[in-house]
Amino acid sequence: MKILIIGAEGQVGHFLTHDLGAQHDVSGTSLLGVDSWPALDIRDPAAVDETLSALKPDYVILTAALTHVDQCEEKPELAEQINVRGPEHVARACQRLGAGLAFFSSEYVFDGQAGPYAEDDPVNPKSVYGKTKLAGEKTVSELVERHLIVRTTVVYAYLPSSVNFFMQVLGRAQKGEPIRVPGDQVGNPTQALNLAQALGELIEQDARGIFNLVGTTRLGRDDFARKILEKLGYAPGVVQSIATSDLKQKAPRPLCGGLKTEKAQALLKKHPLWDLEQALDFTLTQMKEAQPAS
């Protein structure tokens, strides 16, 4: 299968290219032409058409997005351009080519009042980010017959180029800095490679519709930080639980969030979604393998 990953420079794109590249003809683009990937600004419909027409992919995976939640709140027009208009341009190009499209969305399409949420639960985004991701979902599902909407959250891995939650906790622990983490945000941490593998399996099955692809363990963000520190051999007591409101963030966060995984787990045979213990064990393996030999 010819697969194009738009956003190959990101954390999820990194693992998708490596995992899918072993069995498929994978190409990728990046927003700014980094990591040796050619640049593609999804806000430019002509550029999107030109790229997809030249590559003629069987399937497109769109991970590129403006994911900085507070920046979306500060710059709603930019969020609209990247998270709504961009996916529309990609979806229309896929429609013309007859290509499938996997679109990455978020648990932020829910208000976080009564999680965890199933795929068919009522949506009610409270932030600009959540509203733009929901609009992107709607556009993709309306324009592309072979579509996958992937809702995920708190994606992490050992990846020094990333600022994911695992890397932030590791960095602060190594520096001996206090780790202040909201104790009122509940969700499902998601290992990036497991996410990539699960998506690859769904694409190979030609699965369609909305799927929650997250880790199967749901817990508070502060307890997630403590679990990371325990695995790393640091004292978990250095984690200070705070209220989300103490952070004075511009965008509202879904507090009682998280996603249910039964729908995806029923289909995933080769790459079932991991619980936190398995995911953190693998992440430590990633970390050890990345260290230079002594």
Image (cartoon, helix red, strand yellow):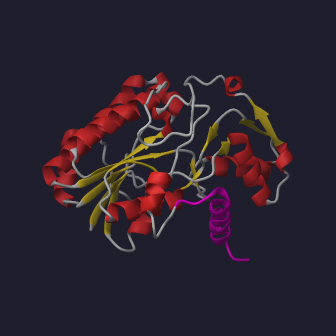
Q: Is residue 248 above or below residue 42?
A: above
- Compared with 249, 99 (above or below) is below
Task: Give the side of residue 202 with respect to residue 191, left or right.
Answer: left
125 is higher (above) or lower (below) than 186: above
Which quadrant is the C terminus positioned in? Answer: bottom right
Between 11 and 188, the residue placed more toward the observer is 188
Q: Residue furthest bottom?
A: 294
| Residue 219 among magenta residues | no
Q: Which residues are magenta?
A: 273-294
The spot of residue 123 in percent (x, y) is 43, 31
Magenta stretch contains residue 290: yes
Looking at the picture, tell me which residue is in the foreground, 51 or 182: 182
Q: Position of residue 291 (x, y in %)?
A: 67, 69
Q: Position of residue 18 (x, y in %)?
A: 44, 67
In percent of the image, x 82 and y 49: which residue is there? 236
Tell me the quarter of the picture where residue 134 sits.
top left
**Residue located farthest toward the left when viewing the structure as drawn:** 96
Q: Which residue shows up at 39% across the image and 67% down it?
A: 20
